[in-house]
Image (cartoon, rainbow, N blue to C red):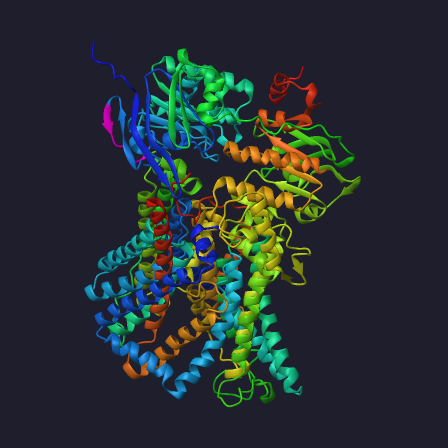
Amino acid sequence: MSEVIDPIIVMFLTFFFGSMLRSATPILLTALGETYGESAGVLNLGAEGMMLIAAFTAFVAGVTANSVLVGLLAGMGTGMLVGLIVAFLVVTLQADQIVVGVGFDIAAVGLTSLGLRVIYGTAQLPLLPPRETINIAPLSSIPIVGALFDQPFMVYLAILLVPIFYYGLYRTRFGLKVRTLGENPMVADTAGVNVFLLRYVILLLVGAMAGLAGTYLSLFQVSFFRDNMTQGRGFIAIGVTMFARWNPVNVLFASLLYGGAESLAGGVQALGFLRTIPNEVVLMLPYIFTIAGLVALARRARLPPALARPYRREL
Amino acid sequence: MKSGTLRGAILSSTSILRPALSTIAAIVGALVAGAMILISIGFNPGEVYYTVFHEAWYTEFGIRKVLIETLPLLIIASGLLVCFRAGLWNVGVQGQMIVGGLFANVVGYVLGPLPSLLIIPLMLMAGMVGGMLWVLPSAVMKARWDLNEIVTTLMMNFIAIDLELYLVKGPLRDPKISTHPMTTPVVATAELPKIPGTQVHIGLLIALGLSVVIYLLMSRTALGYQFRVLGFNINAARYAGLPISRLIVMSLLVSAATGGLAGAVQVAGVMRNIDPEWVPFYGFEAFPLVFLANFNALAIIPFSFLFSSFLVGGDLMHRAVGLPIFFIDVLLGLMLIFFGAAEAVRHLQLKWRRRKG
Amino acid sequence: MPDEPKNAVRTVGITKRFPGVVANSSIDFDVIPGEIHGLLGENGAGKTTLSSILAGYYQPDEGEIYVRDKLVRIRSPKDALKLGIGMVYQHFSLVPRFKVTENVLLGLDVAGQDVKDLKTLANAIIQRAAELGFAIDPWAEVSELSVGEQQRVEILKILFRGASIIILDEPTSVLAPVEVEGLFRTIKSLASQGRSIVFITHKLVEALEFCDRITVLRSGIKVGTLSRSGLGSAREIVQMMFGAEIEPTATRRVTKVGEEVLRLDGIVVENELGHEVVRDLSLTLHKGEILGVAGVEGNGQKELAEALASIRPLKAGKILIAGKSISGSNPAKQYDLGVSYITDDRVGEGLVRDLNVAENVVLKSFRKPPYRSGLVIDWKRVERETERLIQEYSIIARGPKSVTRTLSGGNLQKLLVAREMSGNPSVLVANQPTHGLDARTTQYIHHKLVEQASQGTAVVLISNDLDEVFSLSDTIGVIYRGQIIGLLPREQATREQVAHLMVGLRE
């Protein structure tokens, strides 16, 4: 087989499939949380900030304790903590969701970069050894596509979460309550649902997922922390959630497409492929893709009617 | 999404005093929280804050830099005010500024032989055109298909950054500079002259003039009125037969034009040519500014000055005290969060007080 | 025999204040098991507030509640559900996008009999419905059901939650006269099972016909409770409701009806979902005439009004103004041609509550002189005109610059009406202009409508209030399923006729 196909192409495709899932994972994780959030009427624009702060704390905790597990817990915990604060501001105080979200994004950049310099100064960052992958033999021996089955465990975790999230949102009573919140919170209220408590819970979930995504970035995808390393992924996740119409299964496919775009960009760069197209243009692919996705799929999408509106009992 | 009662309450207050409380609370809150962070990392807040303002206001270098830095902030904030009032969130000003700057740069040397009086306005206009072109796809997508403009303008933002890399390293690269890729600089006649008697270029006057124009636009003109109706109640706008698609596009174009103008002013007044990694942050810094100034086009002037004092002072302080500049970003973000919280509390308090009486 | 509770529910001294108004003032109210107890009062009397307190949606500022003679605290709808109190709100509490089963399922984990899966629930729904004498498809999406069917889903929902005390808020306001019969059969059947029904209404006739007892509220105070046997004349009750003899609404003066001003020719209009809700409708309006369009909510009224105002495009047919066909839907142009439109949704689209009163007054007229000169709006002029309107229409507001949010419902409507009438329109479309308003404001608006007509305006009065239509119109038509049926001059029309037409029964 390999004699027939140009070895460069084989190498490229193998790389492509391998990194596609890895690129998709942070988007997938965040977006899964966002599907619940937006279905409940909460527009979490602070996702970018949550991811970044989680990436930072996960890195620091993991490196200090020399344990990935500690880092993971720290990252997820930080995400949930931020989610709690956002919940207080947005659900209890009923502050504007956009103002609060963007505020967190700005503050997160400052806090993490400041923290990085305060803790490590200009010294070389300590590193954890790169993450091992879980190799699913014999599937991973398949040429080219086999790379899909040799991934860090968080990738598999993210994919496994998809059917769980789907089931939870569409086939359980809990999911029904969540979706009711986004459609008409008053209906939920008169059905005895504690609207405020449920929105708090949702924001904790959103924070946890964004926290996981951030942890993945600084402990799994690479093993360090860099200024502003989220690079807009939080917003891309929000875009993905919207054009996946808040359905976790669609989110998986959309994230894979995004991951494909990003890894295509990386692969073309690394392998010096297609010299006619300049590198920088290829770098634009993921962003162009997000816009294209919105145009193609979200045009007729009906936003949850209660999105970004605080709930009050009034006549 | 656009008729959130909180935003409505902020935007509609005609009395200046009450919303100012939220602004004051936001600034004080951020400073206090910032102080706590400083203490925890071993810095003296008093010393830090003092140094920031001392460097910014009491050194000649500082005050000059502050004024120079104020004007792009002011230009952008004025434009953002318009689209925010219309309920649109243009988060891609950074990209619009970059594209505007590139356009202005090119005009600035291609039209070299022209006299200053012609080339400067043309450059500035080119900047505005560049910014507007860059927001146009997002504007159309929003007007036609109601696609979230926060996501699309931000994506365009990232694309602009990559585009800049490509253009500056490639087609626009100055062949005469071999060490580091830069664009061909604008001709000397295209540089903005300084305000006589100062070291600050006339961009400042442009910025001030723009603020006044925007103020008049929003408070006196029919267009400004329509923007406000759109932002407060889109259903009423529809019911009254306002041209909604056109208003959406126009408000975004205004904010992008100012973004591009800011880029042009930076190129013509300060930089003269462009570094491939020029990534100005004014677009994000202006965001909290507009809110804190309570969407008042005239109040934006002192606030821009205040913000750029923080930013410049922070930069200078960094060298003096050793505190990384990022601390200022923390302050700005906190200000926005505290502002949101303060307004929310004020709103809730209003309801509580009325209930008792 | 164990002591049966004397009362299913009883309130003592319930007081509830809202910003600027005391909605309930020391109300003592009780309901006996198995009775249908009417809660009667005009709009704004406090009926919904009292019920919402019982349903746990609001908390009283003072007072106590006893359920089955035991003192309870109802802190949320959840508590109310657990106590067996269920309320069917006037505008329903259903998610249109969800199926019937999903809507009923919500809340079953709190009270009533919970189910394991939707299929079991679906069967139970079919059965329960049959017991009550109607059929419902449990898997239908609620948005596809008629208003009457939706109401039945609401009632089923309450029953599944095990409600023994059922509160119905203005249930007949969305029903056709014939459907009302079905509702009452259901209610009587429920009452005979020992459940207590609280029936909120502002329609005296209904209360008299169906209730065992009636409690009258006025301005937040309980005026009195009458039992069936002790019912005096309707007049007495009206006095209790309004406090004084209420004058009949402005009687329609007879004027000559002029030439044709606007004509709809076989128009077809679609709603958001793409369904045709106005079908081949034709209508002619004459100068000085009040054309009353009666109809049950949901027969295309809103879309008809929007078509007249050119807010909604026509799928087919023509609009002719003064004989000329207009094409190209544009509300602004339509307004300039003299068509004003009082929307039924004053807060959602008629007014911008975050702008001040003056800014709302020019919402439609800002484009042209005298308010506009060049790019600029002459605000001084606008404010003067606003002052004038505030005076003329007795709008209670602090001034042209006060934020509209501070105005009460009645004043908001007056502002809306003032604005639409001030442009000297040749056609005035009024869609439910007095919905939800107290008697005084209603009377005032009726007076203004008559005044407009006598000045030559062609008025289209779309209303589901038969009394209103009959007292104001020169000509009465009925809108049913998107068409105008039975157009008659008022003298020739009878209430029965119109009521029949509203349900589609022709002679």
**Magenta range:** C70-77
Q: Is residue B329 above or below residue B113?
A: above
Indicate left or right for C421 with B321 as reference.
right
User: Is residue C38 in sight in this rendering?
Assistant: yes
Indicate left or right for B292 with C422 as reference.
left
Q: Is residue C207 above or below residue C462?
A: above
Q: Position of residue A159 (x, y in %)?
A: 37, 49
Q: Which sits in the foreground, A295 or B270?
A: B270
Q: Residue furthest top?
A: C1
The tally of labels here is 0
Q: Position of residue A41 (x, y in %)?
A: 41, 46
Query: Where is residue A173, by image quadrant?
Result: top left
Which residue is drawn at the image coordinates 32% and 81% (left, top)? B317
Which residue is drawn at the image coordinates 67% and 26% (left, top)? C477
Query: Where is residue A65, by image quadrant?
Result: bottom left
User: Is residue A172 in sight in this rendering?
Assistant: no
Residue C73 included in the magenta stretch of the image? yes
Q: For the C terminus of chain A, which image quadrant? A: top left
Q: Position of residue B84 (x, y in %)?
A: 50, 60
Residue C170 included in the magenta stretch of the image? no
Q: Which sits in the foreground, C129 or C360?
A: C360
Q: Residue furthest front?
A: C244
Indicate left or right for A210 with A236 as reference.
left
Q: Which sits in the foreground, C283 or C186?
A: C283
Which residue is drawn at the image coordinates 57% and 30% (left, top)? C298
Q: Position of residue B178 (x, y in %)?
A: 51, 88
Q: Which sits in the foreground, C471 or A95?
A: C471
